[in-house]
Image: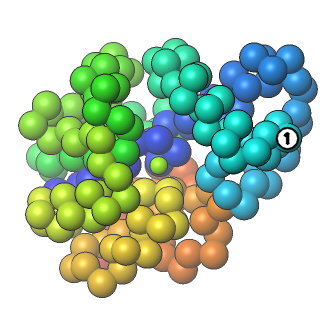
Amino acid sequence: MKFGFDIDDTLINLREHAFHIYNRKLNRNVEVDLFHKLDKVEIHELFDMTAQQGSEMWNSSLEEIYFTSCPPYPDAVETLQRLESEGHEIYYITARPEAYGERTMQWMIDNQFPVDQDRFYYGMNDEDKVHIIKELELDYYFDDKPIIIETLRNLPIKVFTKSQSYNQHLEIPRITNWSELDDLLQNGD
Ligand SMILES: [Mg+2]
């Protein structure tokens, strides 16, 4: 089977990692509880920033956000390793900008994710993602972002969402912990 994965906030805890970086850089002490209650993907409001300021802060912090010690979600690495060892094809499809693509792939390898270079797609905006997902004829796809999930609804592909505070309204199978994947796949067949 072909399994496709978004990376940020699906396999790794990137926004929370960024949240801690913001607290430190801005010398703030915003409670992590507030982060866990956010109903949107962007985190700048917690730091009293406008959308413009938030986007500048995000872009100027990208190097640190992407390439320091962002933790994978529990059991994500092990689950993907197992899928690969069972003979499944693992694809990564990330919106991370082109300029960071190769290093992101290396970061994933360094963090023990099973990576085949020919199955690693970056620089994919929301629309590109949908196209590539169709083209690859994936059997399964996993993402956290509501707008992506919505656009995949009518494709012949099993879509799952990584449960996040901002995607609770989506009525599709959700993964809270990656160790649940086996059960979810069995129930879906
Ligand atoms: Mg994501």
Which quadrant of the figure has residue 79? top left
Q: Nearer the viewer, residue 34 or 97?
A: 97
**Looking at the picture, which amino acid does disc 1 mark?**
Asp
Which quadrant of the figure has residue 28? top right
The residue lying at 84 percent from left, 46 percent from top is: 34
Q: Position of residue 68 (x, y in %)?
A: 52, 15
The residue lying at 17 percent from left, 67 percent from top is: 134
Judge from the rendering whether residue 143 lies leftward or rightward of residue 132; answer left or right.
right
Q: Nearer the viewer, residue 39 or 165?
A: 39
86 shown above or below 17? below
Which quadrant of the figure has residue 133? bottom left
Residue linked to disc 1: 48
On the rendered image, what quadrant is the N terminus found in? bottom left
Q: Nearer the viewer, residue 9 or 123?
A: 123
Tell me if residue 73 can be seen.
yes
Tell me if residue 43 can be seen.
no
Q: Nearer the viewer, residue 162 or 82?
A: 162
On the rendered image, what quadrant is the C terminus found in? bottom left
Q: Position of residue 14 (x, y in %)?
A: 56, 35
